[in-house]
Image (cartoon, rainbow, N blue to C red):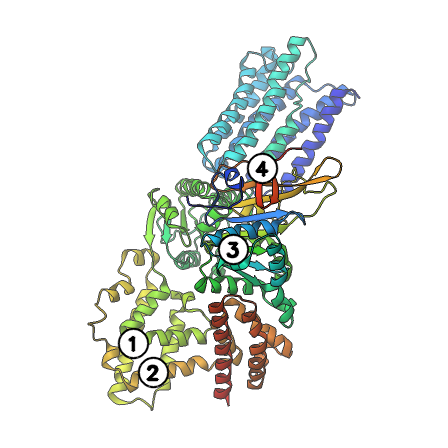
Amino acid sequence: MNLSSAAILAGVAVDAWLLAFIAIRGRRPWLQATYAACSLAYLALGAAFVGTNEGVLADLREDVALGILLLAHALTAILVLGLIHGETLPRRRSAAFLLLVPVPLLAYLAPTAGWTVATAYQGHVLGGFLVLCLGIALAETVYARYSSRLLAAPSFWLGVGVVALIVAGPVYAYELEYLGQTPLVAANLASPIALACFALVAVQADPFSITSRPSKGQTKPGSLPASDAIIFEEIRPKYALRTAHEESSSGRATLILGRTAPAMAAGGAGFAALLPVRHASLRALTTASEFLATSHGGLVVVEDLADLSALSDWPTTVAAVVRLRHVARGTGSTVVFSTCRLTDPERRALRDLRFTWWSLPDPAREIDAILTQSFGKGAARLLASFSRAHGLRQDELTTEHVPALLDFLTRTLAELSGVVVGTASHGLRTQLEAAASGLRSFAAQTAEEVARGKWPSRVSSESHADLLVTAADYWKGKEMEELFAAADTVGEREPLFERARAVFVEQLGDAGESLLRTQLAHLGKKPEELDPSDLVRIADRASIDLGSLAAIVDIPQEKARIQKQIDSIRQQLELIVEEEK
Amino acid sequence: MKRVSTHIEGLDEVLGGGIPEGNVVLVSGAPGTMKTSLTYHILHSNSLNGSRGLYVSLEQGRASLIDHTEGLGYRLDDTHGNLSVLDLGTLRKKLTGSTEQPWLDLFKLYTQGIRKSFDYRFLVLDSLDALEILAKFHEPRREMFSLIRWLRDLHCTAFLLGELPTDRTGGADPRRAAYAKHKEDYLVDGILHLRLARQGEFGMQRQLRVVKMRGTRHDTGYHALVFDNGFRVTRGFA
């Protein structure tokens, strides 16, 4: 076997390996198919060269060899365009496939026109077409390299691949001709390099895996404006997730892109986890565009742009956001971005892009404001009791919790039957009904309505709270105090573990629950098996164990603060034990 | 962009004026490359100028660390309470069932809580590897990502010390692109790589390289890291 046969054979082996790799590894069927066709064309040309050179195969028919060569070049251009534009190319820009039209025609005309594989790159129509294909690929690569920060790295590798094909194709053919050497029929020595570069880009831009993916195809229209990208300006992505939930429940194909799967996404929305990888923005873009390309009119919710910004950088994230808007427009879909945890300069930069912008409140604050309108400052106590009863932090409250909150308030009022009677009872009921009506109407509003309407917190803040005589003030006294006390009772009539957990978490944050569970593990008990005598032991152990927490700090104020927290845990646990007795 | 000085002669020039304030910087290197001393120097020097620093040690006890650093001339008393050492290493020994404790949550509890009474501008975590082992990361990349993001939200300049294995040539292979185990090198804002490079037949030289520093135009080459009366960074020669 001579050197050129050995080199081409090695290239064929690499091509085959890359073909298998992309077929197994990829998540974009159109791109995989194009890659497979392209690599098969190069593989066939290489195998034919080795076969005929080594006398294993008969000479390949000239028109067939030319046909495969033409196909390989046209598919190279289509593949490069696909790698830059993603899955939207075959579906939305299918004109690129017109490059395949001249292939059979030119192969058919080749014998009559005297075009051969040996003279394929010479100055005739066939040579012009081959160079045009490579030229299109190179031009698009260079354009993407300089026009998009997001595509800079992939374009570089695509450029390397295309240049390698040009050097080992037309340039090498002219060189051999000049030197009077036999050309390598149609085999391109650089095909493994080019296919490796294309494979690298395909992997860099591979979409994230989607769990619970909605079925593909046309989806039902949702309530959000189509062909648009909307920015949800909110402190936490509560409305973004709620909107995803509502749209998916109404039959619209919905995808949430975020770090961890939100509980409420179970209502039919797909979820793609953002992984901490180098090309996170690019992969997020391809995930969303692949999803929208297969689910026209769908919805993609990017739960947290700050995550993308942390993983890539802000300019790259902005480039991805802008491209996603194009994808939304091209597919009649909607993309929602939540701005939570973005910095002020980042928010300003987003505003400059002139997206549809919805400023949304934190539902927890609004619920508090609605309750405050009815119950005055006691609203905080009611909410604290409700949160404790449901093991929630108050800032976790969303409109999803409104039915449970109303039920809680109703049960609380029921506790007072027989204690508060007559006019007072009627007054409390009226206040509760007013609060319930306010909560229901707020919870029923869509994100768009909330963004356009007046938020309850703004309404109440405009009311000159100092001068306003609220119903709570009017009814202040025994009845109201009894309502709050009843709420505390309802809230505290929860499992013992929940009460102990609330104490630890209140004082020590997330670490508190883990510390409590460790103490439980030492007692060999499960949370549901906890009884008051265990709490006494936990309180004793906690004061010793947690005392170490303060001992290792060398800042006096901090030492005192931690010690105070530990004392508070002990006191509250003892209080729970007393109450249980 | 506001920058903070490292107070190491030559390093601020290499960094193009200092470290951008609020960056999370991974300081990685093999044992003996002076990661602890270098970061303690930065904390100590800044605390002398009134910028508070918190050093969180998960491995070395407080007494041992202070012995070590005072031996290098960094007296804790000189900082007038602007430098605090949080000795989680000792807590490990004191707390019953220490292997079951939520170390990541405890680390967050302390660093966030201390901020309220001691507004530190610099934080050192010594070391990331110890935290990972103690906290038993089930999904290290995800949890590392979350930790780094959380640190960034603290809005202080944070240094994470990462251990690299010693190779036969005495330093980590510069051609190897990874400076961390779980790709945290992609997540952090900056990476300082420290290594021991062979000098002639018997000698070894400590070297420092700014691999990455978001928001700066920095020199990317290796520089000699010299400690005599304090740290100094100079152009390294073979």
Cβ atoms at labels 2 and 1 below 8 Å apart: yes
Q: Is residue A541 left or right of B48 when viewed as pictured?
A: right
Instruction: Residue type at mark 3: give it.
Output: Leu
- How far is the residue under mark 1 from the one under mark 3? 44 Å
Instruction: Residue type at mark 1: give it.
Output: Phe
- How far is the residue under mark 2 from the one under mark 3? 47 Å
Q: Residue furthest left?
A: A467
Cβ atoms at labels 4 and 2 below 8 Å apart: no
Q: What mark, if any, has residue A364 been given in the picture?
A: none
Q: Name the N-terminal-most of marks 3 and 4.
A: 3
In the rendered image, the vertical position of residue A200 relative to residue B140, given as above or below: above
- Residue under label 3: B123
Indicate the chain on which mark 3 is placed.
B
Q: How many marks?
A: 4
- Residue under label 4: B234
Q: Are marks 1 and 4 on the same chain?
A: no
x, y percentage for residue A118? 65, 14
Instruction: Residue type at mark 2: give it.
Output: Leu
Q: Name the N-terminal-most of marks 2 and 1.
A: 1
- How far is the residue under mark 1 from the one under mark 4? 68 Å
